[in-house]
Image: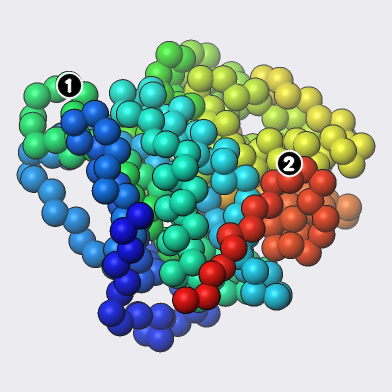
Amino acid sequence: MRIERATHSRIHEIDFDNLPFGETFSDHMFVCDYIDGEWVDARVIPYQPLQMDPSASVLHYGQAVFEGMKAYKDEQGKVWLFRPEDNHARINKSSVRLAIPEFPKEFFMEGLNELLNLDADWIKPGIGNSLYVRPFVFANQPAVSAAASNQYQFIIICAPVKAYYSGEVNVLVSEKFSRAASGGVGYAKAAGNYAASFYPAQLANQQGYQQIIWTDANTHEYLEESGTMNVFFRINDTLITAPTTDTILDGITRKSVIQIAQDAGITVEVRPVKVSEVIEAHKNGSLKEVFGAGTAVVVSPISGIGYRGEKYSIAPVKDSYAKRLKDSIINIQYNRSEDPYGWRKEVVLVTA
Ligand SMILES: Cc1ncc(COP(=O)(O)O)c(C=O)c1O
């Protein structure tokens, strides 16, 4: 792999205590091109703007997918990734759906490794601190014909971050707008899924909600996911979450939560969740917790659900599952506990 180091690091210009999420980027980026049916010229180069033709296919047809993962630093200065192979598998699953060529696993892992080695100082130790890693791939053939591109670029950029949400998270049940339809691209991390969610999210923000909670597009009776989180409901002491069908992203945090909860003896039901069931549980006092799970937030308690003009508040509970599960995952991520699952992967730092 070709490595071109930045001549000057920007790290000293960064206020690591005041980082808006995903607006500051590290010194380097990984880039690889798809030309003539092959991924070629894998390289790590200084972070820089891209050159793209105005006719580049992605700008017209949105043929692009991405991933989101994090690198963590432990107290000894070792760097860790959490289930990175799963991100690789998922970007390829997304790519297949968008007619984008799959990206080889060796390139993905090597690219991550080289990049994190060069930018390891951008990862600060301490719970909540991490380097958000954003792999993405997009169509850059200069052509406005509405067909799959024959050229792509795969890139990984990194942003130092602190915790994602601050304050309360209230979600509004959407019955008008849909995120994903059966047979569509909801299970893929396709760029356009997010573009389509911004307008409904803006309307929800105006009503005082931080996020939408999506329902199925056919009946609007079943709860799906919220923003960039899969959602869990604790009714009495049972944890319930929707199955990941073709309309829901197969979240890596979600499956980690399910595994850890089951191993802790918590009953987990993976099945369709009716809006009416959750509202009923709130009314009869059995809805104890609702929380989202995703890379950015890990686990984030939801303190209110808006539905048909009513707001149903969820008070914090003692012995919160959300807190227990979050702590367990964070302890694995930051190398503060055993990892019986083999989820944590060390990025071996080679000092130059
Ligand atoms: C739509 C959507 N659902 C769920 C998730 C959570 O997935 P993960 O836990 O893999 O980050 C994300 C974020 O990646 C997302 O964008």
Residue 238 at x, y = what percent?
84, 32
Identified at 30% across, 82% down, the residue is 8
| Quadrant including the N terminus | bottom left
Q: Which residue is more in the foreground, 20 or 123? A: 123
Residue 181 at x, y = what percent?
43, 18
Q: Which residue is mark 1?
A: 147
Q: Secondary structure at mark 1?
A: loop
Q: Secondary structure at mark 2?
A: helix
Label placed on residue 129: none
Q: Is residue 189 visible?
A: no
Sequence order check, earlier mark of 2 and 1: 1
Q: Is residue 296 above or below residue 232?
A: below
Q: Label 2 sits on what residue type?
A: Val
Q: Is residue 247 above or below residue 317?
A: above
Res 59 → quadrant: top left
Residue 143 at x, y = what percent?
8, 32
Q: Which residue is more in the foreground, 321 or 143? A: 143
Is 155 displayed left or right of 69 in the figure?
left
Identified at 51% across, 33% down, the residue is 89
Q: Label 1 sits on what residue type?
A: Ala
Q: CA distance from mark 2 to mark 1?
A: 39 Å
Crowding at dot 2, Cα within 10 Å, few <14 / some 14-19 / many 20+, comes out as: many
Crowding at dot 1, Cα within 10 Å, few <14 / some 14-19 / many 20+, comes out as: few
Q: Which residue is mark 2?
A: 257
Is 62 displayed left or right of 265 in the figure?
left
Residue 296 at x, y = what percent?
55, 53
Identified at 32% across, 50% down, the residue is 42
Q: Is residue 36 above or below residue 127?
A: above
